[in-house]
Image: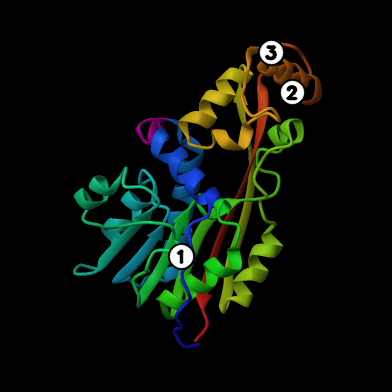
Amino acid sequence: MKNETIPETKPTEATQRVRRAFSRAADRYEGSGQMQEYAAARLAELFRRSLGGKKPRRVLEIGAGSGFLTRRLCPEVFPGGVYTANDLTESFAHRYRSWGCAPLVGDVLQVALPQGQDAVVSSSCFQWIADLSGLFRRLAACLTEGGVLCFSTFGPEHFLQVKSLTGVGLEYPSPERIAGELLGAGFEVGESLREKDLLRFDTAWEMLRYFSATGVNGIARPAGGLWTPGRLQDFERRYRQRYTASPGEPLPLTVDYLWFSARKKC
């Protein structure tokens, strides 16, 4: 498959909301991102397996955020190579530079991506991008033939309790859909992994504070748009009624991890 130019798209209002949310949460994100830290650690292991002992000279990371994955992989780029760290906001650009990375600020569907990449990686980011087909085609276009794509995202059961009670949440794609979109964009799927876990919170307020600290508070807004004391109390009452066995039991929240490795067809 030859490299092709994929037309850029204009940033959507959804993208702008994500940018604002993560900009506001930048200072608090790292201390509250245990879920993202775990996803990045597993992804780094998958990436190393996918390389088969080779050292990439040009790596592009999409949605680098506070650097959970970046700080693991940047030192592994072959000496003299370039590790480009992309993020929606400039909040962490100084950090990327201090690690020897080249910052690239902007929406992955809009910003001009560096070409001739040996690998593209991304951790806990692609769930925010509705157009997976367009995303994967853009990434294929910037990869060399045989180049590696490794990423983590979340599956359809992610945060299911909150979505079932509020009616608000992201549409997390199934592993089958993701694999199909990869194939359609010219990739061969290597490994695909799935793991489910539970986060536990003593109160609904604690859960909402976690969402706010990690920049995802927008997915847990009630139908009325804002949390009032009455709405929060009603939310916790219904949450306990449906998902706990006793009044003092912590509130469970499902995490549905997905990891994929793929290679651009030659």
Q: Over which residues does the magenta segment extend?
A: 26-31
Q: CA distance from mark 2 to mark 1?
A: 41 Å
Tell me if 176 is positioned left or right of 34 in this view.
right
- Residue that mark 2 sits on: 239
Tell me if 266 is positioned left or right of 58 in this view.
right
Camera-nearest label, 3 or 2: 3
- State yes or no: discs 1 and 3 in contact (Cβ < 8 Å): no
Q: Secondary structure at mark 3?
A: helix
Query: Where residue 140 sits: x, y (%)?
Result: 48, 75
Q: CA distance from mark 1 to mark 3?
A: 50 Å
- State yes or no: discs 3 and 2 in contact (Cβ < 8 Å): no
Residue drawn at 71 percent across, 38 percent down: 160
Query: Where residue 207 sits: x, y (%)?
Result: 58, 24
The answer to whether 253 is drawn above or below residue 40 in the figure is above
**Amino acid found under the numbered disc labelled 2:** Tyr
Residue drawn at 50 percent across, 29 percent down: 212
Q: Sequence order check: which comes first, mark 3 or mark 2?
A: 3
- Residue that mark 3 sits on: 230
Query: Where residue 17 sits: x, y (%)?
Result: 50, 43
